[in-house]
Image (cartoon, rainbow, N blue to C red):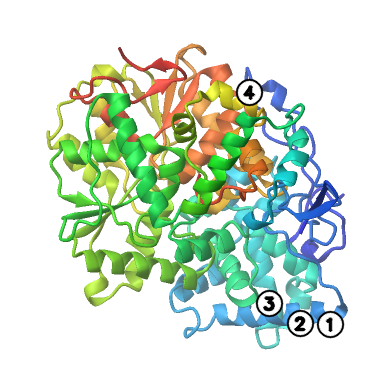
């Protein structure tokens, strides 16, 4: 196996271009050294016999191998056709300018590689360099689509285009969490995260290739039944009714959760995964909004109770369909604004990216819940006793809040007021590291992909969490505040994979739970560490 | 699509062994699958109570109920639920009930 790989090696015939071997990954400290020899389990040959697995022995997409030479040629033509469209204004007006700037100006200085947690933690595997996959795309484009490209490719280093190259590139576009730390580090502003996104888009929009968790079980299911979880409107109502009862039992505070209130000031949209997996987050929002006297509502319309928009990760058409649905629901409810709950990618999709397609009366104001919460907590609308949060707290910065949107301080101003033992991770804010679950990874667990995530893409975050608490005893319960559903899912999986609950007493949750935990009107705490209440 | 053979019948499952279509489920399926989910011996009345509850809920609402809701509605505690389904309610119990693997940000 070649130690150093060049972009042209993507066309090379090999059972596995870049295996991760035992001992390759960055070492973990005490008491996690036993994980240092761990590597990704081999794929079951029976289960993957017709799939293209030759990139790095893991699968996110699982692309079937073409059955004949003719099929292979059709697929390559489709790929080139999609690639051409990425560079045409009528087909890619949304991202063409950023794409062109990034394609034309990379100086290959590798600053991006140093910024990338996947590259660093993998033991510096060349294929995971942010510029590597961009360079593969650039060379294909230059050689096959630029006039005279095949001649210049002989001089400047081309790349052969065969099915293996194409399929590996599709898989490789799902080895980057789109955290865009590389884009921020680049001295000339090249955005390799954006290029990765464009590659995913090409495969989905032109070739129908995407991970089933994002498309078939994601946006398609979301638009059809109302939620990517499969939850229909009745299911949302039943679950929320249950949460309402539970909240009173847990905290002793009676809360009523409003549905479909026409003309309310705020339509609050949660990531519906919260309803199922982190119901106390949904309950805590309701308690805070009620106690602060806000005029607000949830929506029981199809997709009105699920803020997710997986389209933002892989497909502009699906992104637009979901965003338009959200905006239209708000318009018909006649609310003054939408507040997006603790979900990072929903912030990106609905507040940021969708701004380019929401025009006229559907351009409903959209606000981050972090900002709404800051107004409530710092505006003195709640009676708070921070002594109730007398345990070490650190904050995970979801990439979409900090790096994409610049929402850095609201969550910190809240924490400084309610969590006396709050400490930062290093680095943090716009320099944060991704949880490793970004761009859909937290919900992708087919084949051995969850293992790749826990071992490689989430590894840096795990190290950061351990580091933030290094001066605390292993036995003292500690709280990782992660105000984003996707990040929470990834962090839950890290803690479970590395047995960090047992070994380091690490717990995790959102921001609203910490606020409610400090509210004087709660008779009992909402936060528990295992069976133990966080205060008595 | 992976397949498994149980009690002489072929079922389509995903790569984690979850049945693909709810209506292909049968009691024989659950009985024959129990061993793979670390349940010793035959399924008891208590197992069936959970399985039937999950199926009803899923048919009505499109999702598996929250674990706390299962416990409350069936008046059993978490410990008992894990005793019945050693691989856990989300995995073992849902698999035997023929529910598909949870999707979305859960």
Q: Chain of mark 4?
A: B
Cα separation, mark 1 vs mark 2, equals 6 Å
Q: Is residue A68 above or below residue A367?
A: below
* A347 with respect to A74 (left or right): left
Residue under numbered circle 2? A74
Residue A387 occupies quadrant: top left
Q: Chain of mark 1?
A: A
- In front: label 4 or label 2: 4
Residue under numbered circle 4? B83
Cα separation, mark 4 vs mark 2, equals 53 Å
Q: Residue at x 20, y 54 (%)?
A: A266
Q: Is residue A193 above or below residue A74?
A: above
Total label count? 4
- In front: label 3 or label 4: 4
Q: Position of residue A124 (x, y in %)?
A: 69, 44
Residue under numbered circle 3? A79
Q: Is residue A299 above or below residue A105?
A: above
Q: Are marks 1 and 2 in contact (CB under 8 Å)?
A: yes
Describe the element under mark 2 as helix, strand or loop. Answer: helix
| Mark 3 and mark 1 on one chain | yes
Which residue reaches farthest front?
B45
Cα separation, mark 3 vs mark 2, equals 9 Å
Residue A242 occupies quadrant: top left
Cα separation, mark 3 vs mark 4, equals 51 Å
Determine if residue A420 is in view: yes
| Mark 3 and mark 2 on one chain | yes
Describe the element under mark 3 as helix, strand or loop. Answer: helix
Describe the element under mark 4 as helix, strand or loop. Answer: helix
Residue under numbered circle 1? A70
Q: Position of residue A525 (x, y in %)?
A: 31, 21
């Amino acid at each position: 196996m070649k130690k150093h790989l060049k972009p042209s090696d993507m066309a090379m015939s090999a059972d596995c271009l870049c295996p991760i071997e035992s001992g390759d990954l960055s070492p973990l400290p005490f008491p996690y050294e036993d994980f240092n020899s761990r590597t990704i389990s081999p794929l079951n040959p029976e289960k993957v016999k017709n799939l293209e697995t030759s990139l790095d022995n893991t699968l996110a997409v699982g692309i079937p191998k073409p059955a004949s030479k003719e099929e292979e040629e059709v697929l390559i033509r489709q790929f080139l056709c999609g690639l051409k469209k990425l560079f045409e204004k009528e087909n890619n007006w949304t991202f063409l300018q950023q794409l062109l700037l990034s394609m034309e100006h990379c100086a290959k200085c590798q600053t991006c590689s140093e910024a990338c947690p996947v590259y660093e933690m993998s033991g510096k595997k060349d294929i995971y360099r942010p510029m590597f996959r961009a360079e593969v795309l650039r060379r294909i484009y230059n050689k096959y689509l630029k006039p005279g490209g095949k001649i210049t490719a002989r001089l400047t280093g081309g790349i052969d285009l065969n099915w293996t190259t194409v399929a590996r590139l599709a898989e490789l576009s799902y080895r980057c969490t789109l955290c865009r730390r590389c884009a921020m580090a680049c001295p000339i502003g090249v955005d390799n995260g954006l290029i990765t996104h464009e590659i995913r888009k090409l495969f989905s929009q032109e070739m129908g290739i995407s991970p089933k968790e994002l498309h078939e079980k994601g946006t398609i299911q979301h638009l059809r039944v109302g939620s990517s979880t499969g939850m229909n409107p009745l299911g949302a109502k039943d679950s929320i009714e249950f949460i309402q009862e539970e909240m009173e039992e847990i905290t002793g505070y009676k809360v009523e959760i409003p549905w479909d209130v026409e003309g309310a000031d705020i339509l609050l949209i949660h990531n519906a995964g919260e309803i199922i997996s982190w119901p106390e987050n949904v309950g805590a929002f309701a308690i805070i909004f009620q106690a602060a006297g806000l005029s607000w509502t949830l929506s029981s319309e199809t997709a009105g109770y699920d803020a997710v928009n997986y389209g933002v990760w892989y497909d502009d058409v699906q992104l637009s369909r979901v965003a338009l649905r959200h905006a239209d629901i708000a318009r018909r409810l006649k609310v003054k604004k939408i507040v997006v709950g603790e979900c990072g990618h929903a912030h990106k999709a609905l507040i940021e990216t969708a701004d380019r397609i929401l025009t006229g009366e559907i351009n409903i104001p959209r606000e981050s819940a972090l900002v709404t919460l800051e107004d409530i907590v710092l505006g003195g609308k709640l009676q708070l006793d921070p002594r109730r949060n007398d345990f070490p707290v650190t904050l995970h910065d979801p990439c979409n809040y900090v790096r994409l949107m610049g929402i850095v301080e609201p969550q910190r101003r809240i924490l400084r007021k309610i969590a006396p033992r709050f400490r930062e991770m290093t680095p943090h804010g716009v320099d944060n590291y991704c949880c490793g679950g970004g761009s859909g990874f937290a919900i992708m667990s087919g084949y051995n992909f969850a293992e790749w995530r826990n071992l490689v893409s989430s590894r840096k975050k795990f190290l950061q969490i351990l580091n933030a608490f290094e001066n605390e005893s292993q036995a003292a319960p500690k709280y990782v505040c992660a105000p984003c559903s996707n990040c929470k899912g990834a962090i839950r999986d890290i803690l479970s994979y590395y047995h960090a609950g047992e070994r380091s007493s690490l717990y995790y949750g959102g921001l609203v739970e910490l606020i409610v935990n400090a509210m004087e009107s709660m008779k009992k705490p909402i936060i528990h560490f295992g069976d133990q209440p966080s205060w008595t | 699509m992976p397949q498994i053979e149980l009690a002489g019948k072929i079922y389509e499952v995903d790569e984690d062994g979850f049945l693909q279509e709810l209506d292909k489920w049968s009691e024989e399926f659950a009985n024959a699958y129990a061993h793979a989910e670390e349940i010793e011996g035959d399924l008891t009345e208590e197992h069936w109570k959970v399985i039937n509850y999950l199926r009803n809920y899923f048919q009505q609402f499109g999702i598996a109920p929250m674990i706390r809701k299962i416990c409350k509605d069936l008046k059993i505690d978490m410990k008992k639920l894990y005793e019945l389904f050693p691989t856990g309610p989300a995995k073992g119990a849902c698999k035997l009930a023929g529910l598909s693997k949870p999707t979305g940000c859960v």
